[in-house]
Amino acid sequence: MKYSHLTWKELEKKTVYSCRVFSIQDVSSQSPEGDVKTFHVLRAPDWAIVMPLIPHPRGDSFLMVRQWRHGENQLSLEFPGGVIEEGEAIEKAAARELEEETAYRAGQLTLLGTFNPNPAIMANRVHIFLAQDLVALENQNLDDDEYVDVEQVPVQEVLEGMGRPPYVHALMASALTLYLRGGRGA
């Protein structure tokens, strides 16, 4: 194997904490030189992020959601998205999250790419979708702990604001990179 001098072998894993949204495992692994070390790994379900695009001759907009983020203790303006339920196809999850959070349905949903949010300590992926040909529905269908405002934001404003409040969610910057690549899909 070309990179065998870099590859660790997982020996054992033990869950040390578990809650509704993630678990933490102690993972014992053997280094390429035979040393055994323990690492902490956060395990969570995969997520879907949806970039709803609204075309306009004077400049396209994204449909975004503004919500409170407890880790940062502030509001964040971001693309809709959420957890992929066990056994749920990623495209179905993306469509469901879009409908629940924004009350819009996508006529076309395209997978732009997949990332690991932080491969050093996390064992999940985030799947980024572009949503086009949007159709308005009746109402949002939010979870009981979600409070979300839906906003139409010019693409240029998102580009210029990324990395400053309220555009502070790093996964949104990752999604924006895929959009800028041309939205050609995975």
Image: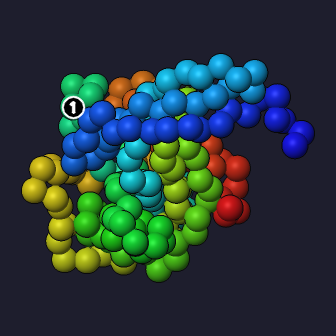
Instruction: Judge whether 94 appears above or below 177 on screen.
Output: below
| Kind of residue sitting beneath label 1 | His
Q: Could you say whether the residue bearing mark 1 is in a helix, strand or loop?
A: loop
Residue sitting nearer the eye, 83 or 75 = 83
Left or right of residue 179, residue 106 in this image: left
Instruction: Judge whether 162 appears above or below 55 on screen.
Output: above
* Residue 47: percent from left, percent from top: 42, 54
Q: Which residue is identified by label 1?
A: 70
* Residue 25: percent from left, percent from top: 39, 36
Residue sitting nearer the eye, 61 or 139 = 139
Name the residue located 50 percent from the left edge and 24 percent from the top edge.
Answer: 38
Asked whether residue 117 appears in the rendered view, the answer is no
Residue sitting nearer the eye, 108 or 28 = 28
Name the residue located 45 percent from the left edge and 39 percent from the top edge.
Answer: 13
Name the residue located 18 percent from the left edge and 67 percent from the top edge.
Answer: 141
Instruction: Identify the image quadrant of the N terminus.
Output: top right
State the image quarter where residue 165 is shown.
Answer: top left
* Residue 106: percent from left, percent from top: 43, 74
